[in-house]
Amino acid sequence: MQPIVFHRVMDTMSMGEWQVVQEPDWLMVLLIGVQETSVEGTISQSPQRERAAQGVVVPPVAVRHVQVIPKNPLGKTPLIMANLSLLR
């Protein structure tokens, strides 16, 4: 799935930070500082609707509210990452 799909959704919402993590069979969206109560439904449904229109199957999306977004080994917080250890 192209990262722009999530950027389009996340850029319209009021929140602190976010990160999408690709797991083997699903996507996990981590959120900090969400101001809207309907954010979970919007985030989990928007990619499915957009990709379904293109005939692409989207894995399930889980939304988690967290205190900290994990950083990579360089100390940066990527917006989108793959959990490569689980994908091998």
Image: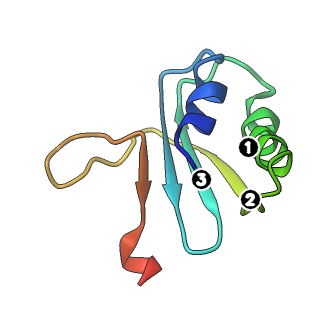
At 78% from the left and 24% from the top, the residue drawn is 37
The secondary structure type at the circle numbered 3 is loop
Residue 18 screen position, x and y as percent: 49, 34
Q: Marks 2 and 1: CB-CB under 8 Å?
A: yes
Residue mark closest to the camera, 3 vs 1: 3
Observer-nearest residue: 63 or 87? 87
Residue 4 screen position, x and y as percent: 55, 35
At 72% from the left and 19% from the top, the residue drawn is 36
Residue lying farthest to the bottom in this orientation: 88
- Picture disc at residue 32: none
* Earlier residue among tags 3 and 1: 3
Q: Which residue is mark 2?
A: 58
* Earlier residue among tags 3 and 2: 3
Q: Which residue is mark 1?
A: 47
The secondary structure type at the circle numbered 2 is loop
Q: Which residue is mark 3?
A: 1
Count neighbours of disc 3 (C-alpha within 10 A) and say few if under 14, some if 14 to 19, many if 20 or more: few
Residue 67 screen position, x and y as percent: 45, 38
Name the kind of residue labelled 1 in the image.
Answer: Pro
Relative placement, left or right, of 37 versus 8 is right
Observer-nearest residue: 15 or 24? 24
Count neighbours of disc 2 (C-alpha within 10 A) and say few if under 14, some if 14 to 19, many if 20 or more: some
**Location of residue 44 by image quarter:** top right
Observer-nearest residue: 5 or 12? 5
Rendering colour mode: rainbow
Q: Marks 3 and 1: CB-CB under 8 Å?
A: yes
Name the kind of residue labelled 3 in the image.
Answer: Met
* Residue 12, placed above or below residue 83: above
